[in-house]
């Protein structure tokens, strides 16, 4: 690792005329290319997708002076490179990367690239679920406390875009995924948050243990002056051999902690070795569900590393109602509530959604599964789900799991699923889109899936009027 780090530092210390191959032409790959081109590297961006679907990206990259290749990867591009930069969605074991690795070419992710040029303090958040909510809340808490803050990473804004903008932020709050953490070398966060680890992406990893190890890399390069924030009730994050010299803060909704944030009655408390501070009341939290209260506690731990004012914090919490596609209220039609939780792309996320609801649920689920299995959901589904409406590739597997205990219907499209769910619902029910699957079998993204759901709900509402 030390040798790799030294080699990388030498390359990035002088990028002018260095041959750099960037893999992937989605927004993260394009942002990495902009950052490299701004430092006068000779950039080739390669994508295996057909050219016809990449015309806009190709035009942008060529305007930056980048070379582009589509319809597959040219091995020579990678073997002749001084450095290879990966987009997060690119599996690190594809053939051209294996060849480059064997030839001694350094391979890093866009997260590592941007880190090498970032001069701001970094707060980084990872976890199977809750990353976007927690990072956005940290951003709001710090912004409202008077800091200059950027929000980036595994969301709408690639880290490289923040760095290449040239703006001098006090803090960059990063959402980081396991895919991004796989390829770090020197990346370290002054404050690193691990929300939870549950089975996910087992279509990419050999085992849950491999996936967990990728998440835990967020602490790998921290020092004793840094802070690690951990979930007291998550078994994987409380490992005694967790490898970090950083100061540990804990958060818990169930018990008091030695140092960190917890709930005492209706008080949200932050405890240090010296004293307890009441930061807010649970009634200040606009978000629904215990899982979101955990996100709030983690975010407050992060904000409290810089001090902070309880009046500011409580005001921020009252004004933060959540994110689009995450337990998003869409409409109430005839006393049936419709909720869009399209961002729930794994089994644990669906479990958290069901736990947050007290009403009977007509559940719309399905899509491209991640080989996690659905058996763990049986108690929740049996107790809270009136009926299930399934879509997508994994509908047969979900039906096999639940058909003996729960009424199940399968539809060909999401609008059909919404109409079917509406017909099955009774007054006081919730129609919940919480797929527990990726969207890529039917949609370009979970965002598109959520927009289709919202449009279909509006159609139900219009037809009933």
Image (cartoon, helix red, strand yellow):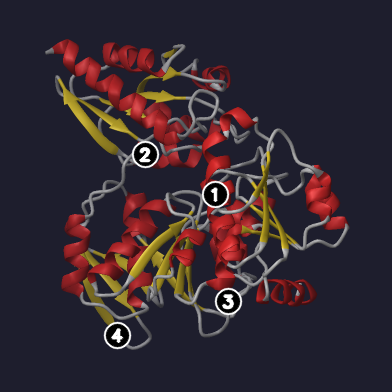
Question: What residue do we see at 24% from left, 75% from top?
Answer: 146
Q: Can residue 282 be seen in this view?
A: no
* Front-lying residue, 16 or 115: 16
How many C-alpha atoms fall within 10 Å of the one at disc 3: few (<14), some, or many (≥20)?
A: many
Instruction: Give the CA separation, mark 3 to mark 1.
Output: 38 Å
What crowding class fits label 4: few (fewer than 14 Cα within 10 Å), some (14-19), or many (20 or more)? Answer: few
The span from disc 1 to disc 4 (Cα, nearest Å) is 57 Å
Tell me the CA gap for discs 2 and 3.
Answer: 33 Å
Determine the residue positioned at 43% across, 65% down. 165
Q: Are marks 4 and 3 in contact (CB under 8 Å)?
A: no
Q: Nearer the viewer, residue 138 or 400?
A: 138
Q: Distance between the residues labelled 1 and 2?
A: 44 Å
For the residue pair 368 and 279, the one nearer the viewer reads as 368
Res 324 → quadrant: top left
Q: Are marks 3 and 1 in contact (CB under 8 Å)?
A: no
Question: Which residue is labeled 4 in the image?
Answer: 275
Q: Position of 295 compared to 55: left or right?
A: left
Instruction: Give the label, 1 or 2, closer to the camera.
Output: 1
Name the element at disc 2: helix
Select label 3 or label 1 by which is in front: 1
**Residue at the image position 37 percent from the left and 50 percent from the top:** 291
Identify the residue position indicated by label 3 in the image.
Answer: 222
Q: Quadrant of the C terminus?
A: top left
């Amino acid at each position: 690792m030390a040798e790799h780090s030294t080699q990388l530092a030498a390359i990035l210390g002088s990028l002018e005329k260095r041959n750099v191959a960037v893999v992937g032409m989605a927004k993260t790959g394009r942002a990495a290319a902009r950052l490299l081109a701004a430092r006068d590297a000779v950039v080739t961006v390669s994508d295996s997708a057909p050219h016809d679907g990449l015309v806009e990206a190709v035009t942008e990259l060529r305007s930056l002076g980048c070379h582009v290749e589509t319809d597959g990867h040219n091995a020579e591009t990678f073997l002749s490179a001084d450095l290879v930069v990966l987009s997060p969605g690119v599996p690190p074991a594809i053939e051209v990367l294996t060849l480059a690795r064997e030839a001694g070419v350094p391979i890093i992710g866009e997260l590592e690239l941007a880190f090498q040029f970032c001069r701001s303090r970094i707060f980084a958040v990872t976890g199977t679920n809750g990353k976007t909510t927690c990072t956005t809340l940290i951003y709001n808490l710090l912004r409202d406390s008077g800091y200059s803050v950027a929000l980036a990473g595994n969301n709408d804004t690639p880290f490289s875009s923040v760095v290449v903008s040239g703006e001098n932020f006090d803090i960059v709050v990063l959402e980081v995924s396991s895919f991004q953490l796989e390829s770090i070398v020197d990346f370290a966060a002054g404050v690193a948050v691990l929300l939870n680890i549950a089975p996910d992406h087992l279509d990419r990893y050999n085992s849950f243990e491999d996936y967990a190890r990728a998440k835990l890399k967020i602490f790998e390069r921290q020092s004793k002056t840094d802070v690690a924030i951990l979930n007291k009730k998550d078994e994987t994050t409380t490992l005694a051999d967790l490898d970090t010299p950083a100061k540990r803060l804990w958060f818990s909704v169930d018990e008091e902690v030695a140092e960190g944030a917890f709930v005492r009655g209706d008080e949200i408390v932050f405890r240090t070795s010296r004293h307890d501070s009441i930061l807010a009341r649970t009634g200040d939290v606009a978000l629904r569900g215990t899982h979101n209260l955990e996100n709030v506690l983690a975010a407050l731990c992060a904000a409290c590393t810089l001090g902070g004012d309880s009046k500011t914090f409580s005001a921020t919490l009252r004004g933060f109602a959540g994110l689009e596609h995450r337990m998003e209220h869409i409409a109430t039609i005839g006393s049936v509530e419709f909720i869009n939780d399209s961002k729930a792309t794994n089994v644990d996320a669906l479990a958290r959604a069901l736990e947050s609801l007290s009403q009977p649920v007509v559940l719309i689920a399905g899509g491209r599964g991640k080989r996690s299995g659905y058996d763990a959901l049986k108690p929740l589904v049996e107790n809270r789900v009136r009926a299930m409406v399934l879509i997508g590739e994994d509908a047969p597997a979900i039906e096999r799991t639940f058909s003996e205990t729960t009424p199940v219907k399968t539809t060909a499209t999401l609008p059909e699923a919404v109409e079917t769910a509406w017909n099955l619902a009774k007054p006081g029910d919730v129609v919940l889109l919480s797929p527990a699957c990726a969207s890529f079998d039917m949609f370009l993204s979970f965002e598109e899936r959520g927009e289709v759901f919202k449009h279909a709900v509006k159609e139900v509402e219009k037809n009933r009027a």
